[in-house]
Amino acid sequence: MKTLCLTLISAILLITGYGQSADSLLIKKIFNNTLTNTEAYENLKLICEKAPGRLVGSEASIVAQKIMQAYFKKLGADKVYVQEFTTDAWVCDSASVFIVAKGRNIKSLHCDALGPSPSTKPMGITAQVVEVKSIDDVKMLGSEGIAGKIVFFNRPWDHTFISTFYGYGNMVDQRAHGPAVAAEYGAAAVIIRSVTNSQDKYPHTGSTRFNETTTPAVAISTLDADLLSKTLKNDPALKVNIFVDARNLKQISTYNLIAEITGYEFPDEIIMAGGHIDAWHNTQGAHDDGAGCVMSGDVLRTFKELGIKNRRTIRVVMFMDEELYQSGGRAYAESVKEKNEKHLFALESDGGAFTPRQFTINASPRVLAHVSKLQPLFHPYGIDDIKAGWGGVDIDPLQDQGIPLAGYGTDSQRYFDMHHSANDSFDKINLRELQLGCGNMAAFIYLIDKYGVE
Amino acid sequence: MKTLCLTLISAILLITGYGQSADSLLIKKIFNNTLTNTEAYENLKLICEKAPGRLVGSEASIVAQKIMQAYFKKLGADKVYVQEFTTDAWVCDSASVFIVAKGRNIKSLHCDALGPSPSTKPMGITAQVVEVKSIDDVKMLGSEGIAGKIVFFNRPWDHTFISTFYGYGNMVDQRAHGPAVAAEYGAAAVIIRSVTNSQDKYPHTGSTRFNETTTPAVAISTLDADLLSKTLKNDPALKVNIFVDARNLKQISTYNLIAEITGYEFPDEIIMAGGHIDAWHNTQGAHDDGAGCVMSGDVLRTFKELGIKNRRTIRVVMFMDEELYQSGGRAYAESVKEKNEKHLFALESDGGAFTPRQFTINASPRVLAHVSKLQPLFHPYGIDDIKAGWGGVDIDPLQDQGIPLAGYGTDSQRYFDMHHSANDSFDKINLRELQLGCGNMAAFIYLIDKYGVE
């Protein structure tokens, strides 16, 4: 009854707009705080510099968790604990791609192995290259066209999508599924054009999904993909040497990191915010997703520092292993189910610390309608839409339990210049853009805590 | 089933809505073109690399105009011509600021002269420093507190403004008017804390306005301003040496550059787009305002390449001297008046090539109401507002003639990190953000040409 009354009052406040002016003031207070605080920025610098290449299973991934764990303890969170789970993992020690002429490696291409590519022999694999634009091309060529060859997926980015996430979605099948299909037709190895809109020297890695058969798989930079394609046109019998030194790790133990401020009214109702702490072996992972971790973490700092009392428990999760097998998100969802924890809402940030644009909501129309009413409160801070859309990879497994999910959406234009490459480094972080992210996430969590989700 | 129905309805709405809007299709065509074209980017690279420090009166300023002139001729614009005018100008050859101890320069601070600072004596000016936070502080200290001293304006940026243009507006009086007031009280020289939100080593220069009395005036970096302030607290009798080698140029001849595609229906009605070609002596001026020039210029390319027939004459103007005396904008407005040219509309871009956010309109409520109805067409391309606001420095003098003015507004968060400093270099330009600006400007000009302004 108490809940009902409070919800009704909240709803009335929200509808009449009375609540909105008080909320506007509180939100302004949140932004005044985040825009003059640099702790999230300093945490991100630490993670990037002390724990680059923090793929699940790496020492760096634990270093990064410990940086955030120490920070949450320093903040005085009510609970800071780890959630252990086991998962397969993968380590890549090195990779190279050379154009070969007269039996010698003559031109090195900028490359990184895709995860979880198997190793080649110590001297690598040398074979002819067959360039394709799609998985269908591979199927059409069949075993006789593919077996023993190096398959080179080179369909370029379509620049006419406005959101670069659509551009990515339109191209990424080559990386995600191309190697598996090529392997089934007996390919000796696979080269992927980096999945990026940028014409640069950086190889952009990422995950690929094998079935039974595997094959060594690498990404080369877009400039080198153009070079290789051009060279192939002049010399279709051209050979390439691919070398990968990598290994699978079986059932290692790792963990998600959790920090909470207990709710004073409904301590058992959980509002979650999070990002993923892991990053590919070739990058500092500044935007992807160090930024999401420190912005989520900053929600706790803001609540603490401004003395905002939360009705529900605010929980921040640093997910492990978004990149390779998404095992952290699954382990988290399983634990929620097992413990029968009541999650009211889960918010993820995994799109980088660019200027704010939107919140996307993956929930029932009823929840969406309720939550999207909050948009005018965010308009001054760059959020022009609260609309239906994706929550995030790590929180997605919570969907089965009917938990409303949300994603913090930033401007996408620069994201794929850096994504999964050495270019995603701390110097690409703009302090104010990160601070605006901290403000928007804290404000959203504050409003969900106050008004609920329906 | 419910999901299926919703999906079907959405699809039908999307299809019919899309089909009905010829404008949406044409605008999509414009963006498909600009997002796959790199000429504006290449022009900007040329301007930045071949003509850095292109302040009015400099050789570089003419080099930049010639780069654009050649480009407009190559495009096959119907008219390409220059509009000569005379103006005072200013050249700075060097500037330095040192902290002095025991009569020797012991610590160099990163500095640039404000325009048009006078020179110091060849050995510079050495004097005690009085730190102030405002012009009122100077007035309160009066002649006895100021005369013979170096006045150090050090009120910092207020980070709690969301648009950084408000932060700039809140701080810039120190630079724009501080030196004149300090000079009237007999200051030996003036140091300004750089007008930027960024804590970095870059001095950010800019214009200052003297009355009768002048005094040498320089900006130091924010980090050095903090250092100087801290050093002064320990040693209030501290002296600083300021050296400036600069000179005024009297009534030089320079020009605005104009290129046009003649309207087929109303050739005498002019729709203008432009930016300013000049940039401070310490910078490549990539965002300010090389970007505005090349995006404006790209409107002509897009019309030409897509075969868009314009009813009115589309005119692009590369304004000279926005930075120092704003003489190009005044000369242009005078010429418009003198020739009795009919300007329907003038659009300026001078906020950098960041991701699109808005168009601001300085016009009658009637024109504003008409033009803001176009906003839904721009929503897919990042323009969330078409609202009342500032047009631009160069087009502002046209206001007296009742001409509707508009500004292309980009995301402001990163702008003042770079503004008027060596940090505003070509490597800070993101290709896609620039291309989106080209698209939005071309689309806006297209719609104004088609529908007029009321």
Image: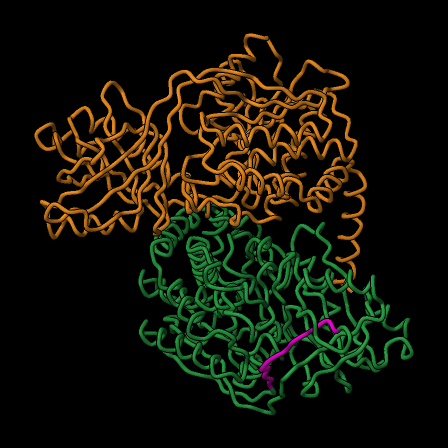
Chain colours: A green, B orange
Q: Position of residue B420 (x, y in %)?
A: 41, 39
* Stretch in magenta: A89-100
Q: Vertically, is A7 above or below B192? A: below
Judged by its main secondary structure, the magenta piece is strand
Q: Is residue A187 left or right of residue B72?
A: right
Q: Vertically, is A301 above or below A53? A: above
Number of marks: 0
Q: Is residue A100 left or right of residue B366?
A: right
The C terminus of chain A - image quarter: bottom right
Q: Is residue A238 left or right of residue A302?
A: right
* Residue located at (39% from left, 76% from top): A67
Q: Position of residue B224 (x, y in %)?
A: 27, 49
Q: Vertically, is A214 above or below B34? A: below
Q: Position of residue A284 (x, y in %)?
A: 50, 69
* Residue located at (58% from left, 25% from top): B317
Please tell me which residue lies in front, B58 or A171. B58
Give residue B444's quadrant in the image.
top right
Q: Determine if the magenta segment contains residue A391.
A: no
